[in-house]
Image: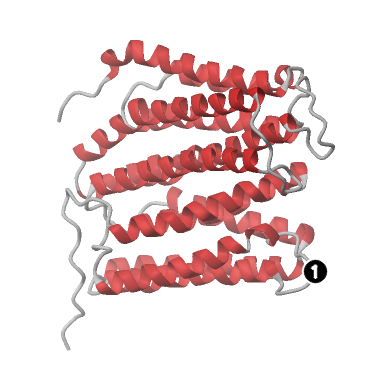
């Protein structure tokens, strides 16, 4: 019997397909749910729980980004698989709010979250084995990956059933194993990177999506207060909106002008299996702190709106600082984003940005000082720091642009 015919791999200039963009829209909803979860979470523990959920969601997105680089996602079998994965991801996203603390009535939501997540993973492996038809080495790689995914999936199931500290520990270990192990172990006949442009575009789009979610979260906070009542616009809210735009533009500028170009350039210079280690480290590993950092910044900005609207009391006090968890999330998110950029530059054989590293350290060091400032001033100071880094990087950019291939 003839071996199964493997789907045609994308050409080197292949770009993101429409079904992948549709998949990303579902991921947008998941990120929005994540920010709402952080906003309604349980202070410090909520930040840790949110990070675990983000890590699990990043596995989903990253796995499907690799999948779309192995075969055209707009073919019928791939479209069907992606559609089923979208349905499962949508259910997973709906369960995020009660994934740690189930509300009375209805289904047991932690189990719903796990079932949805495992269904997304099952769709991935179904498509992956279809794409790997006729390739024994890739089949061996996928069997190993499936065994690891089965073990971490079991940890998620047990954690959901027990809840509490057991859930926190088991879900944390499962998320860490799913994220780190595949990306730090030597590749053994796994995925190839057929189109560097597709892979760079997919990750650029997800950064844009995260930045867009930042604006959406801020807008949602302005539209209604914590009791759901609409709040009229006032000068502090407008100033905070301009600060939100400044933060968004600063983060966007740094990535798309100084981080992404040298990485895509370096990836294009490599060939065959030499591309895989760079992609796994620079994209899979180091793009996670970029996206997670933006989500935590979005949480901090939504908390800013709550402070400016008077919080639960409804009494506005413009001298009030941001709560500690929101402040750590905001400044820590920016620090993670700024630190990831130079790390990516280093892997890309470009000179790591000293201004970005300095600003990352300054963001963390300034947290105690920022808590002594009014919330709007603390956020505006962070935006000013970002724009200053953009200005310095732009002034020195000509000396650090990669040479043409």
For residue 17, which quarter of the picture?
Answer: bottom left
> Callout 1: 10 Å neighbours few (<14), some, many (20+)?
few
Q: Is residue 36 visible?
A: yes
* Residue visible at 68% across and 68% down in the picture: 109
- Image x and y of residue 144, in percent: 43, 67
* Residue visible at 73% across and 33% down in the picture: 309
- Please, what secondary structure does the residue beneath circle 1 have? loop
| Vertical relation: 241 (above or below) 275 | above
In which quadrant will I find the C terminus? top left
| Vertical relation: 170 (above or below) 363 | below
- Image x and y of residue 32, in percent: 56, 50
For residue 329, which quarter of the picture?
Answer: top right
In depth, the one of 58 and 92 nearer the eye is 92
Q: Is residue 270 left or right of residue 199?
A: left
In depth, the one of 323 and 314 nearer the eye is 314
Q: Is residue 188 visible?
A: no
| Vertical relation: 342 (above or below) 182 | above
Check disc 1 and report the residue beneath it. 104
* Residue visible at 23% across and 50% down in the picture: 15
- Image x and y of residue 370, in percent: 70, 19
For residue 69, which quarter of the picture?
Answer: bottom left
Total of numbered circles in the picture? Answer: 1
Residue found at the far front of this picture: 232
- Image x and y of residue 323, in percent: 76, 31
* Residue visible at 41% across and 40% down in the picture: 208
In depth, the one of 147 and 127 nearer the eye is 127
Q: Is residue 71 left or right of residue 164?
A: left
């Amino acid at each position: 019997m003839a071996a199964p015919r493997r789907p045609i791999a994308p050409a080197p200039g292949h770009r993101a397909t429409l079904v992948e963009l549709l998949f990303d829209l579902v991921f947008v909803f998941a990120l929005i749910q994540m920010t709402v979860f952080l906003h309604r979470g349980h202070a410090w523990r909520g930040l840790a729980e949110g990070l675990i959920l983000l890590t699990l969601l990043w596995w989903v997105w990253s796995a499907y980004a690799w999948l779309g680089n192995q075969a055209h996602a707009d073919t019928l079998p791939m479209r069907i698989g992606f559609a089923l994965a979208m349905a499962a991801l949508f259910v997973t996203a709906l369960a995020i709010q009660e994934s740690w603390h189930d509300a009375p009535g209805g289904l047991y939501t932690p189990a719903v979250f796990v079932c949805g997540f495992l269904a997304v993973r099952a769709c991935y492996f179904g498509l992956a084995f279809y794409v790997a038809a006729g390739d024994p080495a890739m089949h061996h790689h996928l069997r190993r990956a499936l065994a690891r995914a089965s073990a971490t999936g079991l940890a998620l199931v047990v954690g959901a059933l027990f809840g509490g500290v057991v859930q926190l520990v088991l879900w944390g270990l499962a998320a860490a194993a799913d994220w780190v192990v595949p990306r730090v172990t030597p590749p053994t006949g796994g995925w190839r990177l057929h189109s560097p442009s597709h892979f760079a575009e997919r990750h650029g789009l997800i950064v844009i999506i995260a930045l867009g979610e930042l604006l959406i979260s801020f807008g949602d906070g302005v539209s209604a207060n914590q009791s759901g009542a609409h709040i009229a616009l006032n000068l502090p809210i407008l100033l905070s909106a301009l600060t939100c735009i400044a933060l968004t533009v600063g983060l966007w500028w740094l990535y798309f002008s100084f981080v992404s170009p040298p990485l895509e350039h370096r990836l294009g210079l490599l060939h065959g299996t030499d591309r895989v280690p760079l992609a796994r480290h620079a994209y899979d590993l180091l793009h996670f702190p970029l996206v997670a950092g933006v989500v935590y910044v979005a949480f901090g900005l939504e908390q800013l709106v709550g402070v400016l609207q008077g919080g639960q009391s409804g009494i506005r006090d413009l001298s009030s600082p941001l709560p500690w968890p929101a402040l750590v999330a905001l400044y820590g998110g920016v620090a993670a984003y700024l630190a990831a950029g130079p790390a990516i530059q280093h892997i890309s054989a470009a000179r790591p940005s000293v201004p970005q590293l300095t600003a990352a350290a300054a963001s963390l060091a300034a947290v105690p000082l920022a808590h002594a400032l009014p919330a709007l001033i603390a956020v505006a100071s962070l935006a000013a720091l970002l724009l200053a880094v953009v200005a310095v990087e732009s002034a020195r950019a000509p000396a650090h642009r990669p040479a043409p291939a």
